[in-house]
Image: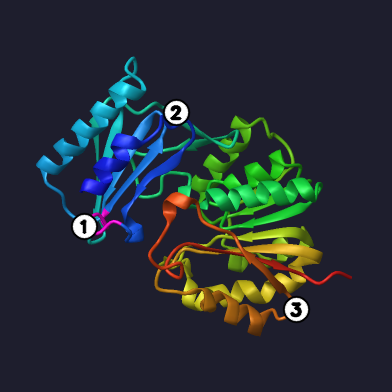
Amino acid sequence: MQALLHAIATMALPQDAQRVFHGRGGLHPGCEHWVLDAFPPVFVLTSFKPTTDDELATVHEALQTRWQKLAPEQTLNWVFQCRHESQTETRLMSGAVPEPHVVTEQGARYRVHVLKGQNHGLFLDMAEGRCWVRQHVAEHPKLKVLNLFAYTCAFSVVAQQAGAKHVVNVDMSHGAMAIGQQNHQLNGLMAGASFLAHDIFKTWGKISRSGPYGLIIVDPPSYQKGSFVATKDYARLMRRLPELLAPGGHALLCLNAPELDLAFLQDQMQELAPELTFEQRVPNPAVFADVSPERSLKVLVYKAPEL
């Protein structure tokens, strides 16, 4: 775990929510199961295989030592989560977790929950995707945006902050949509957004009536039984894009499935929506570097033809 301990010993005081150490990228042999995130004022250490009390004590000592240098007047707060064989165990190891727990990223505020579930309310690997949306909307003000699989609506928040005319958020999770509405309120965005807690595949009529859209964001789970399986369901989304996009509009397609490569998206787009032009792959945050770019998060930009 030396690479993890080194990352802790050299980290700066985190202000925004961010990843501190990404063992999952395979660049640190022996540390592939470790991930350390900062959701200020709380650190979250995740292990993807069982750990020993000695290992956790070593991490605690490293965090405590660094924290005394970074913020000696503040209590160290950290949480440990073990994910192994579809089981998840979460423990508060030191300090406390604020309630409500609100973090920031590039001036936006988000509600998170680090003591329950595997998804904490904000996907840190999508930081550059949110940055791209912020910049794109700022350059194309008054866009109408469709945010599919909106989760807690982080894309919607940055789009509205950048000047989007309206954002339609769609996600079948009522709980996630409720947090998404809180996120809008946290940022003083009380108008200009819709929240549809529906199954996307049963809501095309309503989605179409609100279009066409200048920007469509598609960020589905790679595999969620009974909801979305990328290998068969992504194609159903791609077929809809040409009719939902305004002339010259853009689509941001996201896929976080290590077993599916870039060609999975590009080949299907070429077949199912050939009129859309591939423009770029949005880079991932540097801390999420991976031995194989094909395994890491894929965020692709496509453009519809102009009139």
Residue lying farthest bottom? 271
Mark 2 neighbour density, 10 Å: few (under 14) some (14–19) many (20 or more): few
> In this image, 109 relative to 165: left or right?
left
Query: Percent x, y for residue 51?
Result: 15, 49
Res. 194 in view:
no
Q: Residue at x 58, y 45 (%)?
A: 154
47 or 181, nearer to the observer: 47
Query: Percent x, y for residue 96?
Result: 31, 26
Q: Residue at x 81, y 47 (%)?
A: 142
Query: Percent x, y for residue 282?
Result: 59, 59
Q: Residue at x 64, y 66 (%)?
A: 280
Under mark 1, the amino acid is Gly
Q: Is residue 115 above or below residue 82?
A: above
Nearer to us: label 2 or label 3: 3
The tag earlier along the polypeptide, 3 or 1, is: 1
Give me the C-alpha separation between circle 3 and circle 1. Answer: 45 Å
Under mark 2, the amino acid is Pro
What range is drawn magenta here? Answer: 28-33
Quadrant in the picture for residue 201 = bottom right
Give me the C-alpha separation between circle 1 and circle 2. Answer: 36 Å
Nearer to us: label 1 or label 2: 1
> In this image, 238 relative to 38: left or right?
right
Give me the C-alpha separation between circle 2 and circle 3. Answer: 45 Å
Q: Is residue 146 magenta?
A: no
Mark identifier at residue 30: 1
Q: Residue beneath label 2, please?
A: 100
205 or 139, nearer to the observer: 139
Dot 3 and dot 1 residues touching (CB under 8 Å): no
Query: Percent x, y for residue 145?
Result: 72, 54
